[in-house]
Image (cartoon, helix red, strand yellow):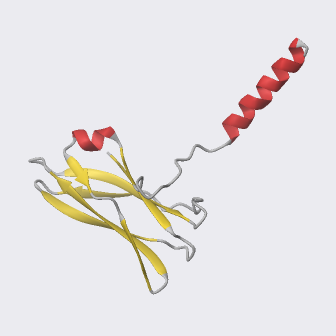
Amino acid sequence: MTTGRVALLLAALTLAGCSSRPAIPVANNQTLVMESSILAAGITAQPPTLSTEELQPSASSRLFNERQQPVTVHYRFYWYDARGLEMHPLEAPRSVTIPANSGVTLYGNANYLGARNVRLYLYL
């Protein structure tokens, strides 16, 4: 191969890599994703539980604040179909303030009838 062809091939591979969206495949044991800052802030969380009532999938997760001051946490539920593909459009991120030494329950409802799995992403 000539140098020009190698450069063209490398450029094409670079562009192909840039156009694909990074994704974290969802698995039953990876339904909760927390940034390290969440743990540093004294927040712990239970993985979301998925339920289907009246055909609309919903999820809930319990968060606990082990600190002496309230902490505001941002979160988003990501919904996946039976093949593990992320469903769009994404829900808007939400926020909750967890009072000192207490807990809150987060709730999310899928607007998609085909949602079969959920992931909860937490960040500060």
Q: Is residue 88 left or right of residue 93?
A: right
Q: Is residue 110 left or right of residue 45?
A: right
Q: Is residue 20 left or right of residue 98?
A: right
Measured as percent of width and height from the top left, residue 73 is found at: 29, 52
Residues 21 and 90: in front is: 21
The image quadrant that residue 5 belongs to is: top right
- Count numbered badges in the picture: 0
Q: Residue furthest bottom?
A: 54
Residue found at x 19% / y 56%: 64
Residue found at x 26% / y 66%: 105
Residues 88 and 81: in front is: 81
Up-down relation of residue 2 to residue 99 (above or below): above
Up-down relation of residue 34 to residue 109 (above or below): above
Residue found at x 29% / y 39%: 37
Q: Identify the image quadrant of the C terminus.
A: top left
Measured as percent of width and height from the top left, residue 57 is found at: 46, 75
Q: Is residue 109 left or right of residue 13?
A: left
Q: Residue furthest right?
A: 2
Up-down relation of residue 94 to residue 3 (above or below): below
Q: Identify the image quadrant of the N terminus.
A: top right
Up-down relation of residue 10 to residue 47 (above or below): above
Measured as percent of width and height from the top left, residue 99 is found at: 15, 57
